[in-house]
């Protein structure tokens, strides 16, 4: 199949485009949110950069939507209506924001475009309304068992921790820094020590490394810490587990389902998390044993093969769905995102 999708979430896209299809990624001069294309990623030749403005609508078999605005962008550029005369699916990557749990999904009032949630927690928490829903859990290209744990330090991967604050558990980092020095990887980690009041000798901001370098450097840390309060299941956590790292995880959103207790600890008790982090730093053999358990669990549930098989099943089902009449006006029956609706 020829699948159109925008490069929105790099790590998820990295797994998705390693499937058995042809992937069309819009590109624009200067990139940006609507034109990243491959963005220099080492992806298969089946991933092609395209100029949507010159793309023939008939050359697309299905569109994978990830933002409500893409509904109208597809109509504007291809002249085809997602879910009407172009098979479409919407991938919801995020937990709802705002008046949780009374938050309607943007596609809640339509039934022609299925919504795929990346976690069961997300599917349960969103009000999906009439939209058909399913869950396809994450898949991770296996980086291999790289864990050495040679550094008695705690590794954390988080993007924009200063801006996102309590959402990503940034306020919890000083407590973890009192247990062992932190290495923090991710976008816009500069200034994190000053923002949290952590002494620079206890926190090193490593920045946004390339994937292979990130895996190599993260795997040198004795323990992976995942302090996220309200994010979807972080791919960095699953990558750390694949690397063979023991994990210390805040028990929020999907984490309790994803991480077995023998992989480290999953708890909402901050003191328990700190005690476990300290014990694992002080006991390399226990850390290694728990890391192997983490890797085994991650390979079983979050393998790339399982992820791709589930997506192939869904894509095949999309092609079998009946299409609506192509004689309708192009603006008819386009699903209107819930957040764009006006209350009478």
Image (cartoon, rainbow, N blue to C red):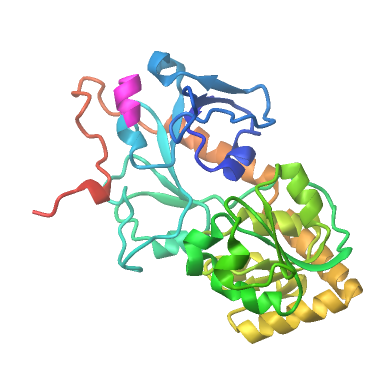
Magenta segment, prevailing SS (helix, strand or loop): helix
Q: Is 118 drawn above or below residue 327 in the view shown?
A: below
Q: Is residue 98 left or right of residue 237?
A: left
Residue 299: x %, y % from top left? 75, 54
Q: Is residue 254 left or right of residue 44?
A: left
Q: Which of 168 and 198 is in front in this view?
A: 198
Q: Which of 53 and 187 is in front in this view?
A: 187
- Residue furthest to the right in view is 285
Q: Which of 210 and 128 is in front in this view?
A: 210
Where residue 38 sits, quadrant-wise, is top right
Residue 142 is at least partly visible in this image: no
Q: Which of 197 and 27 is in front in this view?
A: 197
Q: Give the range drawn in magenta.
A: 73-81
* Residue 136 magenta: no
Residue 72: x %, y % from top left? 30, 32
Q: In which quarter of the image is the N terminus?
A: top right
Residue 343: x %, y % from top left? 13, 54
Residue 68: x %, y % from top left? 34, 42
Residue 92 is at least partly visible in this image: yes
Q: In this view, does 113 lie to the left or right of 311?
A: left
The residue that appears at 45% across and 36% down in the rendered structure is 33
């Amino acid at each position: 199949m020829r699948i159109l999708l925008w490069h929105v979430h790099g790590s998820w896209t990295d797994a998705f485009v390693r499937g058995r299809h042809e992937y069309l990624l819009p590109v624009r001069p200067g990139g940006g949110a609507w034109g990243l294309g491959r963005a220099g990623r080492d992806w298969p030749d089946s991933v092609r950069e395209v100029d949507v403005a010159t793309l023939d609508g008939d050359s697309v078999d299905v569109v994978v939507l990830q933002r409500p605005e893409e509904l109208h962008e597809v109509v504007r550029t291809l002249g085809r209506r997602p879910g009407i005369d172009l098979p479409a699916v919407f991938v919801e990557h995020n937990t709802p924001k705002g008046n949780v749990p009374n938050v309607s999904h943007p596609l809640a009032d339509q039934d022609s475009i299925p919504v795929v949630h990346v976690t069961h927690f997300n599917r349960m928490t969103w009000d999906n309304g009439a939209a058909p829903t399913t869950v396809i859990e994450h898949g991770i290209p296996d980086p291999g068992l790289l864990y050495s744990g040679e550094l008695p330090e705690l590794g954390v991967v988080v993007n924009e921790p200063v801006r996102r604050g309590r959402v990503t558990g940034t306020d919890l980092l000083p407590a973890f820094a009192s247990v062992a020095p932190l290495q923090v990887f991710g976008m816009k980690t500069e200034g994190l020590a000053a923002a949290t009041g952590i002494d620079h000798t206890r926190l090193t901001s490593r920045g946004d490394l390339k994937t292979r370098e990130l895996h190599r450097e993260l795997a040198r840390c004795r323990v992976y810490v995942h302090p996220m309060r309200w994010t979807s299941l972080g791919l960095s956590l699953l990558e750390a587990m694949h690397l063979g790292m023991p994990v210390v995880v805040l028990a929020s959103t999907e984490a309790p389902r994803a991480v077995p207790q023998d992989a480290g600890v999953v708890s909402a008790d901050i003191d328990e998390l700190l005690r476990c982090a300290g014990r694992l730093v002080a006991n390399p053999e226990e850390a290694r044993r728990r890391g192997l358990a983490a890797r085994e669990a991650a390979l079983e549930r979050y393998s790339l093969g399982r992820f791709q098989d589930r997506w192939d099943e869904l894509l095949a089902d999309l092609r079998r769905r009946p299409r609506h009449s192509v004689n309708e006006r192009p603006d008819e029956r386009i699903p209107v995102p819930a957040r764009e609706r006006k209350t009478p």
